[in-house]
Image: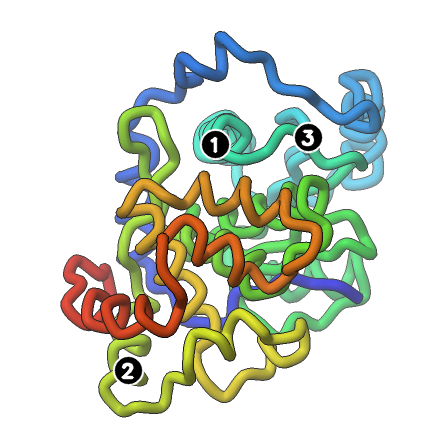
Amino acid sequence: MRRARLTSMCTQQIAASCCRESMTKPLVLIACLAATPLRIAAAEPSVDELTVRRSELATRLRGQGFTVVVEPPFVVIGDESPGTVKHHAAGILHWSIRLLEAEYFEARPGKLIEIWLFRNEKTYRQGAKKFFGDEPDTPYGYYSSEHDAMVMNIGPGAGTLVHEVVHPYVEANFPAAPAWFNEGLASLYERPSEKKGHIWGLPNWRLPNLKKQINDHTLPDLAKLLGTSRDEFYNAEFDAYAYARYLLLYLQEQGKLTEFYQKFVADKKDRTGRTALEAVLGENVETFEPRWRKWAVALKGDNH
């Protein structure tokens, strides 16, 4: 079963910071999105399909303490109070969908995906087992392409939700994306904010371990990260999530991340991303990497 996982610790304090920074910004589309309509995939679930699924789920879950709402292109199910579930859907989820679509994604997921938000780890694990037969190996959340569902513990905060939302969009728009990019982009928005109408990732709790591995000389060459297979990424002995996240955060800070994404998607020959990366950097990875490592070690502002 194809899953995208969060595998590192995220505290309540971190989550609260994430929510404050995300929700204090206006939930509006940037001007270029209004001027240039999104090209939505034909298979995007219709309003009628979403409404029917919401009704089916509400009937199926009646009396079990769940609220079901529609936030296109998703159906959201939560075991918190109705007001809280609606707030998650109309707030951080709506905000992240709009900004991610404006920044990267022309197509919405071409299938109906459910987002299951459980109030804490206990109900998350119980729900994953009861409704999907899963026993998660992460306390935070995962995206299951097999079940067309995101299943997560919303207790630690909104960063988990935004991380998981990225995965079905990558699946729909860049199916050939390697795991390092898929997880790197999702991890970038574990601590999301908004900057001049663009979604913006901030330094987070993955930074200290990245610095440690750089200083301990246990982080491999960048070429190794770019060349990892799916299994190599998820089973890496180094912190592959942090490595990928902070490579993309660097590109974001240099104003090159969206350009890199576009070049990477368009490149049908090199599926590692190296060619696209070197094109936007204007140099090869061997000369770039020492500078990136120095930048990463000096980076401040993690919310660990």
Q: Amino acid at mark 2?
A: Ile
- Which residue carries the number 2 mark? 214
Q: Is residue 253 left or right of residue 235?
A: left
Mark-to-mark CA distance, 2 and 1? 31 Å
Looking at the picture, does residue 177 appear above or below residue 83? below
- Nearer to us in this view, 216 or 301: 216
User: Residue at point 68% right, 31% down?
Assistant: 108
Does dot 1 land on a helix, a strand or a loop? helix
The image quadrant where one finds the N terminus is bottom right
Looking at the picture, does residue 247 appear above or below residue 17? below
- Which residue carries the number 1 mark? 103
> To which quarter of the image does residue 278 belong?
bottom left
Mark-to-mark CA distance, 2 and 3? 37 Å
Cβ atoms under marks 2 and 3 closer than 8 Å: no
Mark-to-mark CA distance, 1 and 3? 12 Å
Q: Is residue 174 left or right of residue 208?
A: right
Q: Residues within 10 Å of mark 3 (few under 14, many from 20)?
A: some
